[in-house]
């Protein structure tokens, strides 16, 4: 009996340590502040990161690790009040002219108007895949979780666990490049984009409201860490990634996820490049017509 109790205590300690290692993100350990000249701050013993923007500069950070596939989550609380012209971001990106990128961009607006969640995806330097959404909550009142699932078969954007967008690997059927060979870092930033962010640039940033501040917490990255150079894949922590030993490597939308995705698209999507025939008069991009 005593032996069993010792085993049980050891098991509980192991489980508690495992949970801690997965969920107890610390910005001091996980990211580097890359720009902003003091406008980015790590607070609360590494549990909170704030970015600020004034008329002279914004600010940003990047993950210390770079990844080839993974699941990436962060909680954000967006700029409150009149945030017109500002853009707060969380995204993955490689470097170079033929870079890959997966974007969450939150476009500020006048007080009382809804935020616009702007998403985009680049593969081999080709973007122009914008989809935009309103949110079903006020993202300035509390923290909400924004996530990217990126594996060899598809990319899914999530808001509080609800899928809002999916991009499948259709290289074989359509010839459209898929992000699968360039490692990416996770980034966050807050910057001024009043030439396009709010109502197409019609509403400018009101600098009398500065500084603007966005907050980040609980950043986690569960993926294949690469030790190659930026964009390199010479070595990763998932040598058997192709075999799909990690849960997120095999994850896909189930029937409930597919229904939730349809619900978001029906009720909250406000722009889809795949239906913008004025922009693509010769035909929308090939992935838009894929049926699989």
Image (cartoon, grey):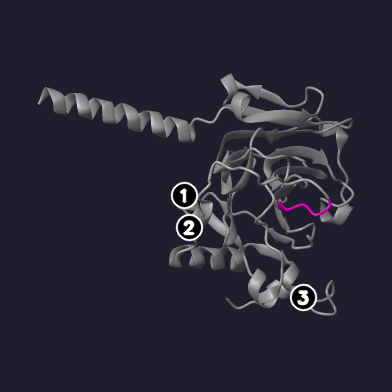
Q: Residues within 10 Å of mark 3 (few under 14, many from 20)?
A: some
Which stretch did the figure color magenta? 97-101
Q: What number is the disc on residue 250?
A: 2
Q: Give the labeled residue for mark 1.
A: 246
Q: What SS does tag 3 mark?
A: loop
- Is the residue 168 above or below the residue 89 in the image? below
- The reply to whether discs 1 and 2 touch (Cβ–Cβ < 8 Å) is yes
Question: What is the C-alpha distance between the residues marked 1 and 2?
Answer: 7 Å
- What residue would you read off at disc 3? 284
> Residue 268, how many percent across, how many down?
63, 62
Q: Position of residue 66 (x, y in %)?
A: 65, 40
x and y percent of residue 111 in the render? 74, 44
> What residue is drawn where x is 82% and y is 50%?
197
Image disc number at residue 272: none
Residue 173 lies in magenta, yes or no?
A: no
Q: Is residue 188 visible?
A: yes
């Amino acid at each position: 009996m005593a032996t069993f109790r010792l085993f049980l205590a050891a098991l509980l300690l192991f489980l508690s340590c495992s949970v801690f290692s997965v969920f107890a993100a610390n910005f001091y350990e996980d990211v580097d502040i890359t720009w902003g000249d003091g406008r980015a701050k790590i607070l609360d013993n590494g549990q909170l990161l704030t970015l600020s923007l004034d008329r002279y500069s914004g600010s940003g950070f990047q993950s210390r690790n770079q990844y080839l596939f993974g699941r990436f989550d962060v909680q954000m609380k967006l700029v409150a009040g009149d945030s017109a012209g500002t853009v707060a971001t969380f995204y993955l990106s490689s470097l170079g002219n033929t870079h890959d990128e997966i974007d969450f961009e939150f476009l500020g607006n006048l007080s009382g108007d809804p935020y616009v969640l702007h998403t985009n995806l680049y593969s081999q330097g080709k973007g122009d895949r914008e989809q935009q959404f309103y949110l079903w909550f006020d993202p300035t009142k509390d923290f909400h979780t924004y996530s990217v699932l990126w594996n060899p078969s598809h990319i899914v954007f999530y808001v509080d666990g609800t899928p809002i967008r999916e991009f499948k690997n259709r290289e074989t059927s359509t010839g459209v490049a898929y992000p699968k060979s360039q490692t990416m870092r996770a980034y966050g930033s807050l910057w001024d984009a009043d030439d396009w962010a709010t109502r197409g640039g019609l509403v400018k940033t009101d600098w009398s409201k500065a500084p603007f501040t966005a907050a980040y917490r609980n950043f986690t990255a569960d993926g294949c860490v690469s030790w190659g150079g930026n964009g390199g894949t010479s070595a990763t922590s998932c040598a058997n990634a192709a075999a799909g030993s990690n849960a997120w490597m095999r994850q896909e939308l189930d029937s409930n996820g597919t229904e939730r995705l349809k619900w978001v698209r029906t009720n909250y999507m406000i722009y889809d490049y795949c239906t913008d025939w004025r922009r693509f008069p010769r035909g929308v991009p090939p992935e838009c017509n894929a049926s699989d």
